[in-house]
Image (tube, rainbow, N blue to C red):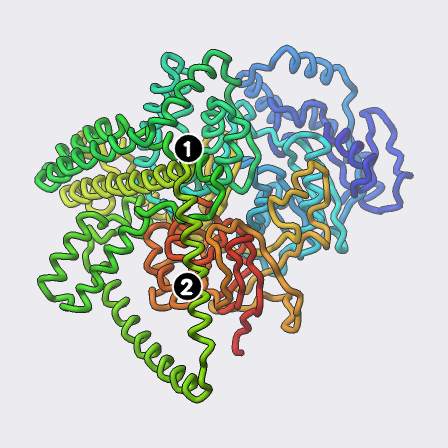
Amino acid sequence: MKARHLEILQEKGFPVPKFILVSENEEVDLSFSEKEYFAVRSNFSAEDGGGHSFAGQFLTRLNVKREKVQEAVQEVFASYAGSSEYKEKANRGKEEYCPTKREKAEQKKLESSVETVLIQEMLFPEKSGVLFTKNPKGILSEMVVVLGQGLGDKVVEDQENVLTYHYFPGECLYQEGQGTGLALDEEELKTLFTLGEKIEQLFQKPMDIEFAIEKGKIYILQAREITTLDMHLPVRILDNSNISESFPGVCLPLTESFAGEMYSGIFTSLGRRFLGKKVSSYEELFQRMVGGFSGRMYYEISSWYDILRLLPFSGKIIPVWQGMLGVSNEEISFSKKKPGFFLKCRIAFLFCYYFFVSQRKMQELDKFFQERYAGYSKRVDEEEDAQALYRIFLEMKEDLLREWDITLMNDMVSFISTHLYGKKTAFSLETMKPVRALSALKTVAGKYGLDSEEYRREKKSYISVYGDRIVGELKLETRTYRTNEELLDRWILDSLETESAERYKLSEAKHSLRKVCVEKNCVETDSAEKDCEETSHMEKSSEQKQRKSFLYRLAESSCNNREISRLHRTRCFGLMRRIVDKIGEKTIGFDVYYLSLDELKELLFSGKDFSLKIAREKELRKAYERLPVLSRVKLLGKVDRDPLAGEIRGLSYKFVKGKGSREEKSGKSEDIFSSESMNLERKEDIKGQDVEKGKEVGDSTPRVFFGRGVSKGIFRGEVLKIKSLQEVRATEAKGKILLSYSTDPGWFPYLNMAEGLITERGSLLSHSAILARELEKPAVVNIPNIMEELQSGDIVEIDGDLGICSVVKEYRKGK
């Protein structure tokens, strides 16, 4: 198999060192090469089979002189028949492995074939290693390169210090480890990954490829199927579109577990409502609606597609759902068979019914929740027993989730009605309520002071309603205004200081403007203001006419109800946070957040010690913080990234056409690493470095990025890049264009002070979009890799109508 693959690669023009095959009794003829040294490799017929595959099972001789080749060949043949180690391993493999009839036939054919040995020209490479076109752990969207110095055998056998490259096409590339004088340069990376993709496409299998680099040229020494991948496991596709707004950054185990329980419970209820007796065939699917990967929360989007497929006109609805949720990768996959005709008819009838009654149902749910929440909140405050608190959680879960699935139907109504209406109108008035409430609280603080009774009373009222609305509101470990009132006091004080400074500046500006107007006798101002007022009046009149339409009313109602339900969801998570905090006070403190729900139950009712597990989870989360964020990942079964304890260095790159562009979806096989389509750049590891290496200071080529315009308007200003809100103060956002991976409800104080917004993720119905529209700030979201492309201090112009971000001037350190 090894030699056959090399023959195919050689025929297709891949860079393979010259080689020949010899049988056991054949005289070796080395006339095919003028080299003095050769590699004599095993080529046993069953060597690369799934049942007999392991490294070093047969002999390989390297650096063999021309006159010693015949002797080395006989030694390799002897290893075929005489190796007791191979016999032991092969027998063990037969006991554990039950081949199919086809595999038995292939095995019989192999056993009857003539065995050979492969003689290959010896290379003396500076670097060599192994390229896996799929991560052997089962991460199907990752390519891995393990690189070492010198001959590849040291790398394969783990005897050489290695450098590892992790590549997620269209996502990120990063380097693990540090080798003195050992690295792949830009051109080598381009060539190697291109070869890997082409070889995988040629054999239509995930491949394990040995390579060597001699005098700057890459050679393929061996290509075999990755036999450790269990292709019988289900393929899972995880996507963080939209969900990263509510679960930003790395989440602790209790949050992952609780979120999984909530989503599973809601979709199970939805399944019972729509599927009836057929629900049993989808129950396993409902357990996989969300999942964690590298400590971050993802939608298990492959499960969502199976559910959306049940809906009438699913072919039309799925693209709308993708657009509204901000799903950038539009590849669709299904794990279940297409639903039958009668089931589709049942679902279509119920879908139409709930589509028209959804708004009434949402009002009923709102009333139901208000009543139940008050009761549970009081019980949690009064209860002091840890086991009793856990039982309250179980009761709350069953009670509150019983009717919650109607919110999913309302989401679909809002997606469809908003899409059909097609305008970037600020539908959701509910989003502004916490903004206005916070503004009122700030006014009271400014008038009476933070130590006044009036402020304390208003603060208590605000926290009772919106105390859980903060950055990362659905992460149970997040400290909110309800759990720490000082966070709110700090923000109010910060905001008041900013306003005071701005009022002084504004007063000075007005004084200067009046002076100039008097000197120049400005009479055109009044006329311009009048024209502006008339234009505004006409726009408002047109808007009022639009609001009379049924579609507008439905979009407005469903969007408002969507925000109400999201606020209630936040309160549910806040109530759970209070339960867990009180359980922690009685048991192991904040460490309870490093347990899953099942483990928390064991801790409370059996007293099991989880100290080792907690310590492990803490270290894992620290490691995951250092890994690049992935927007989408394809997995084989349940698998996660290695935590990578060593040094990690991110390598930036950009596609000229842009990830996910329509040109790339044509299905044509192109060299994506050509000089015209990709540029790899290393980033300096020096803190505060603002200019990437390789960029010329005088480069005036304009850079334009396309995303999704979600709030109309055009603004030119300075970028403020935010990776974590903990790193910046709200005052720094004043007059800036905020740049982030995504936002959530906790961002509104910052966006309120800013003049625009750019995000890598997002959609028309994300909080980023809703807040930007309500605050009348232009916003462009869903721009791939924009966090790599822009820096704080860059001057950009954003067009919220067309979804364009143009770089006007790049920030240069020291200028």
Q: Please tell me how crowded label 2 is: few (under 14), some (14-19), or many (20+) other residues with Cα within 10 Å.
A: few
Q: Is 106 left or right of 494, judged from the image as shown?
A: right
The x, y position of residue 324, in whole percent, is 47, 40
Q: Is 165 left or right of 2, judged from the image as shown?
A: left
Q: Nearer the viewer, residue 513 or 652?
A: 513
Label annotation for residue 546: none
Q: Which one is earlier in the sequence, the residue at label 1 or at label 2?
A: 1
Which amino acid type is shown beneath numbered disc 1?
Answer: Met
Query: Can residue 115 be seen in this snapshot?
Result: yes
Q: Secondary structure at mark 1?
A: helix
Q: Is 629 left or right of 556, judged from the image as shown?
A: right
Q: Secondary structure at mark 2?
A: helix
The x, y position of residue 597, in whole percent, is 27, 34
For the point 74% across and 35% down, which residue is it? 41
For the point 59% across and 43% down, which residue is it? 144
Task: Give the quarter of the image for residue 692.
Answer: bottom right
Is the residue under label 2 in contact with that under label 1 (CB below 8 Å)? no
Query: Can residue 68 be seen in this snapshot?
Result: no
Q: Which residue is mark 2?
A: 533
Q: Please tell me how crowded label 1 is: few (under 14), some (14-19), or many (20+) other residues with Cα within 10 Å.
A: some
Q: Which residue is mark 1?
A: 412
Question: In which quadrant will I find the N terminus?
Answer: top right
Which amino acid type is shown beneath numbered disc 2?
Answer: Glu
Please count the marks in the image: 2
Query: Looking at the image, is 289 positioned above or below residue 528?
Result: above
Task: Give the quarter of the image for residue 3.
Answer: top right
For the point 60% across and 47% down, which residue is it? 659
The x, y position of residue 20, in whole percent, is 83, 34
**CA distance for labels 1 and 2:** 38 Å
Task: Give the quarter of the image for residue 329.
Answer: top right
The x, y position of residue 781, in whole percent, is 49, 51
Residue depth check, mark 1 versus mark 2: number of the one nearer the observer: 2
